[in-house]
Amino acid sequence: MKVFEENNGNIFKILSEAISEGIVIVNEHQEIVTSNDAADKMFGYKTEELLGENLSILIPREYRNTHPQQVDKFLEKSDPRQMGHGRDLYGQRKDGSVFPVEAGLNPFKISGSQFVMALVTDISVRKNQELEIIELNSHLEQKIEERTKELNENIKILKDEVTKRKQAENKMKESLRKERELNDLKTKFLSLVSHEFKTPLSGILTSATLAGKYTETEQQDKREKHLKTIQSKVKYLNNILNDFLSIERLESGKTNYKFDVVPLSKVVNEVIYNSNMLLKDGQKINYPSNIDDISINFDEKILELSLTNLINNAIKYSPEYTIIDVIVTPRKDAVEIKIEDQGMGIPKNEQKFIFNRYFRAANALLDQGTGIGLNIVKSHLENLGGTIKFESVEGKGSTFTISFPTKNNLEYNENNTSY
Ligand code: ADP
């Protein structure tokens, strides 16, 4: 220690006081041989108070054990280096308080004695700043996390809102579409009525006028002929009106199907009876022979509408002196009815359009018609689990086949055994 002070004290003092880092020099026994002002202040000692003390006085208790070995190892290698190697280093003040430091060790020899100069920097401020930055960062991360969560929630709310609006928009579009179709239908109806009703109405007027002219008792058969014409034309007009009402109900979703257990013969009889009024000269409908025992559980009105349309078409699109066959085939839980005519048939290239609403084949245009009958029959039957198909050869005839389930509502069936 003496050697160091005597030979180097002055130079050391001059140099060390100019440096802002703390300088502590220890001998090979790790006794402090000198320290500069910055080091004394840093560790809270008065000038020269540290002289002769062991270096461990400046090291917190928990680090003291490992420290001497570190210094020994360091002296073995004896080259200048930074202490710590990534670990945090701490110094201890006189009052026992601990603070973070950075220390660089510089070994040197004077007169054969080994010394180590430690350059110590108080890095409390830097550490605090680091801590603050870490804390700020974690705050920031937390904030970002919160904001992201909020954003995600808002996005979800927005998405829900968009979905709801889309649904509302679709609903509106759908009801607009329906309204437009109903309006179209009304327009079509008005134009059809003006065309389709004109001829039968003037026919009715003519027949009524003529019937009025036959005043003699023996002219009863002539009166009857005109009354029959009137009846058939009224029936025809009534059928058109029924078809239109049916479409209107189908379109506006107001169709209410009603299942009843009825004998099939009741419906077939009624339809054929009414259709007979429309028969042309020499036309004949062959009544099905085997239907007396068949009971169905089906919507009677729909079956009536379907058969009426098919049989009236067979009459309308067939010439005089032809036969129309009505053939019933009971199937398992279903009934199949064929209407076979020997009429004009449907041109092959138009067959695929035949169930389209308002479609009428080219060869049918001279006959009166609206093109809606087959379309509504198909819609109703399919709604009720039934089917309709046809085969037709132009110039030879057509066969329309409908099939419908007969056990639609079993509960109802059991409770209504009166049939
Ligand atoms: P409409 O008979 O009032 O024109 P439908 O929907 O009943 O309307 O029939 C559509 C079209 O299908 C008819 O215009 C006609 O061209 C064709 N059609 C339907 N039934 C027959 C049939 N039995 N024979 C020939 N053509 C038919």
Image: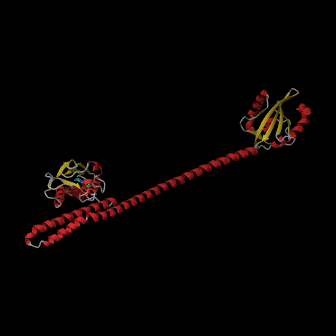
How far from the left and from the top, in percent, is residue 349?
28, 48
Q: How is the image coloured?
A: secondary structure
> Which residue is painted at 74% across and 44% down in the image?
126
Task: Residue 366: give x, y in percent of width and height.
Answer: 24, 58
Image: 337 above or below 208 = above
- Tell me the quarter of the picture where residue 81 sits: top right
Can you give x and y, in whole percent of width and height, for residue 26 in the image? 83, 33
Q: Residue furthest bottom?
A: 215
Q: Quadrant of the C terminus?
A: bottom left
Residue 335 visible in rendering: no
Toward which corner of the image does residue 51 lie, by quadrant?
A: top right
The residue lying toward the viewer, choosing from 357 and 319, is 319
Residue 179, by quadrant, is bottom left
Residue 16 showing in the rendered view: yes
Q: Quadrant of the N terminus?
A: top right
Q: Is residue 332 left or right of residue 68?
A: left
Q: Position of residue 170 (x, y in %)?
A: 43, 57
Tally of numbered tags? 0
Instruction: Pick whichever, 29 or 344, lies toward us.
Output: 344
Q: Vertical placement of 245 versus 8: above or below?
A: below
- Tell me the residue at 55%/51% (across/down): 152
Q: Is residue 385 left or right of residue 266?
A: right
- Closer to the camera, 147 or 212? 212
Going by the image, does 261 lie left or right of 121? left
**Residue at the left extreme, as displayed:** 218
Please tell me in which quarter of the rendered image ligand 1 is found.
Answer: bottom left
